[in-house]
Amino acid sequence: MIDMEVVELSRWQFALTAMYHFLFVPLTLGLAFMLAIMETVYVMTNRQVWKDMTKFWGALFGINFALGVATGITMEFQFGMNWSYYSHYVGDVFGAPLAIEGLMAFFLEATLVGLFFFGWDRMSKQGHLAVTWFMALGTNLSALWILIANGWMQNPVGSEFNPDTMRMEVVNFGAVLLNPVAQAKFVHTVSAGYVTAAVFVLAVSAWFLLQRRHTGFAKRSMTVAAGFGLAGALSVVVLGDESGYALTDNQRMKLAALEAMWETHEPPAPLTVIGFPDVENQTTHFAVDIPWVLGLIATRSFDREVEGILPLVAIAEDRVENGIRAYDALMTLRVDETDVDARAVFEESWRDLGYAYLLTAYMEDPREATPEQIRQAALDTIPDVPVLFWSFRIMAGLGFYFILLFGVAFVLVTLRKHETRWFLWVALFSLPLPWVAAELGWLLAEYGRQPWIIEGQLPTFMGVSSLNATQIWMTIAGFTVFYGVLAVIMVMLMLQVIKKGPYPELAGGETPKKRPSVHGSTKPVPAE
C-alpha cells in the first residue's frame, strides 16, 4: 500500500520548486523580445539612448535569467529523486523533449546570452542584433520543449503502454510534438510572459517618471512597453480561449470543474461569471450565468454539449470497470506473455488501465473491488472544484485588466502624456499582478489534472519514489532556505540596478547629452 503522506509531501515539494521557478520564466520570455525590439531601434536610428535602454533592461534580464536557470536545474533532478516510478514509466516519452530543452537552455540559450553581454565591443551592430534576436527565439523555443513534455502529461498522444516492459513508449513522435494541448499551452504561456515583461518595464518606467529621473529614457521604455504589452494582453485572452477549446476533447473533467458545472446543460452551455461551488451538495449557489458563452468557447458550435461533472463521473465508472479487465489481462500476460486471448483483451482495453490503478489507493488487487469502491474511484477523478473555479476567475479577470491597463497606456503614450501621475501609480502597483495570474494558470493546469500525473494513464500517487516522510521534509526545508536566500539576493540585485538607473554616473535627472570618456574628456552622445 502507498504511503499517502509521502505522496502529498512529494507533491508539495514539486509545487514549491515549480512555482518558484516560474517566477523567473515569464519575465525571461518577454524581456528577451523587448530587448530585441529596443536594439533594433538602436541599429536603425543609431541613437545612443536605445542602446542604453537595451543594456539597462538587459542587466535585469541577466539577473532573472541566472536565477531561472539555477532553480530549473533542481526541478529536473526531482524527477529522479521524488518521482522515480514516474520517470521509469514515461522515460521513453518524457525524456526526449526534456533532453532537447536542456540542450537548448544550457548550450544554445546560455551561449547566446553570453554573446549578448560580452559581445557589444567585439561584434558589429548588425551581428550583435542578430545575437539578441536569436537569444529571444532560443529562450522561447526552450519553453516550447518543456511545454511539449508537460502537454503530453495532460494529453498522452503518440504513445502506448507496452505490457512487456511495463512502460509508456513512443509510437508517433510527430503526434507528441504536435499535441494540440501542448501547442495551446505554449502560445498561451509565452504570451503571458510578454505581458509580464511589459508590466515590469511599464512599472519601473513609471517609478522613474514619478521620481523625475531619466525621464527621456523612461518615456521611451514606457512607449515600448505599452505597444508590446497591449499586443501581449490581447494575445493572452485570444490564446486562452484556444486553451479552453483544447480542454473540450482532452480534459473534459478539468473544464467542467473550473466552471463548477455539475450537470450537462442543453447546448450551447452558459458561462458562470460568479458563484459559490458546494461540493458536498454538488451544486453552485448564487450562480450568475451568461447564456451560450461556454458552449461557444468550448465547442465552437451551438449544438455540441459540454459535459458536466456528474455525467463524467458515470463515464469514469465504466472506465474503471474496463480498466479492471485490462489489469486482469496484464496480470495474465505477466505470467504467460504468449497468452493470445489475454493479449487481445489487453490491446482492446489498455487505455483504461490507469482507471483500475485508481483502486490501488484502497486495495492491493483492483480485481477485488466492490461496486462501492469502483464508485469511489470514479469520484476521485473530480479535482478540487472551488480552487479551480476561483483560480480561473481571478486569472481571467486579471487578463482583462491587463488589456485595459495597456489600452490606457497606449493612448497616453500616443498623446505624449507619459507623466499622467494617476496612471503612473496604477502602473507601479500593478507590478505583481502578472505573476499572480501566471501562478494561477499553472495551478489550473497542474492541480486541475489531479488525480492524474499522466491524464487517464497513471495516478499521481503511483509515481512517487521509495522515500520516507522525514527525508522529504528535510529536502523541503533545504529548498525553502536555499530558495529564500536566492530570492533575497535577486531582489537586492534588481533593486540595486533599478536604483542606480541607466546612468549611474548621474545623481539623477535627464539622459546625458555628453558622457565622460575613460580618459576624462567628453564624448558627444546623440541627442534624445
Image (cartoon, rainbow, N blue to C red):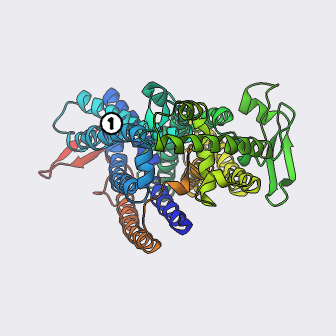
Number of labelled discs? 1
Q: Residue at left 17%, top 39%?
A: 121
Q: Amino acid at mark 1?
A: Met
Q: Residues within 10 Å of mark 1 (few under 14, many from 20)?
A: many
- Residue 129 at x, y percent in the picture: 29, 31
- Residue 317 at x, y percent in the picture: 73, 45
- Residue 99 at x, y percent in the picture: 33, 40
**Residue nearest the observer in this picture, 2 or 508:** 2
**In the image, residue 175 above or below residue 115:** above
Q: Is residue 478 visible?
A: yes
**In the image, residue 102 above or below residue 63:** above
Q: Is residue 195 visible?
A: no
Q: Where the C terminus falls, by quadrant?
A: top left
**In the image, residue 39 above or below residue 484:** above
**Residue nearest the observer in this picture, 161 or 446:** 161
- Residue 73 at x, y percent in the picture: 34, 53
Q: Where the N terminus falls, by quadrant?
A: bottom right
The residue indicated by pointer 1 is 135
**Residue nearest the observer in this picture, 5 or 490:** 5
- Residue at the left extreme of this rendering: 519
**In the image, residue 320 above or below residue 125:** below
Q: Residue at left 39%, top 57%?
A: 78
Classify residue 402 as left or right of residue 194: right
Q: Residue at left 49%, top 43%?
A: 193
Circle 1 — which element?
helix
